[in-house]
Image (cartoon, rainbow, N blue to C red):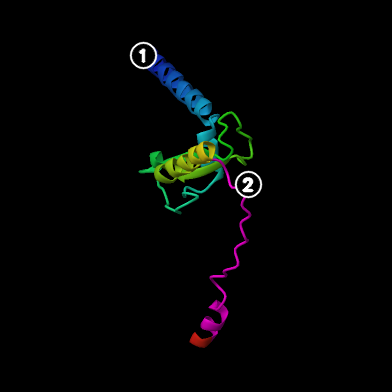
Amino acid sequence: MAKEAEGKSKLDKILEAQRDYIAKREVGYRDRALKLYPWVCGRCAREFTRANLSELTVHHVDHNHDNNPADGSNWELLCLYCHDEEHSKFVDFVRYGGRADKKLAPATHNPFAGLKDALAKKT
């Protein structure tokens, strides 16, 4: 009987340690971002499951890893490839400068312009 009590005590200690570990880990911004956002790359729209979730990263939009607001407004979930591309664009921006002197015209193309008419013809 005493051994069973000790066994339960050990189990309780193990479970408590596991709960503490999970709680500490969830304080990290990656776990919070994974709870806030769907497991989809924000650039290429690749979907993730638990099997390949390690390939989904949290990108800091302002590139400041200390800026972790609770609402996740500085985070973006990106796959490994899109995350690398985003950082290479930032490096190029720092290295070669921005487009402050060039004004870009707003986009005018509407990919769904004729969709309503096309759907009306099908029915």
Quadrant of res 98: top right
- Crowd around label 1: few <14 · some 14–19 · many ≥20 (10 Å): few
What's under tag 1, amino acid-wise? Lys
Residue found 51% across the figure and 49% down from its top: 38
Camera-side residue: 103 or 5?
Answer: 103
The spot of residue 73 in percent (x, y) is 62, 41
Q: Main secondary structure of the magenta part?
A: loop
Quadrant of res 76: top right
Check disc 2 and report its element: helix, strand or loop. Answer: loop
Residue 71 in view here? yes
> Which residue matches tag 2?
100
Residue 123 in view here? no
Check disc 1 and report its element: helix, strand or loop. Answer: helix
> Which residue matches tag 1?
3
For residue 77, the mark is none
Residue farthest along the front direction in this orientation:
101
Residue found 54% across the figure and 33% down from its top: 29
What's under tag 2, amino acid-wise? Ala
103 up-or-down from 20: above or below: below
Q: Quadrant of the N terminus?
A: top left
Relative placement, left or right, of 112 versus 78 is: right
Residue found 54% across the figure and 77% down from its top: 115
The stretch in magenta equals 97-120
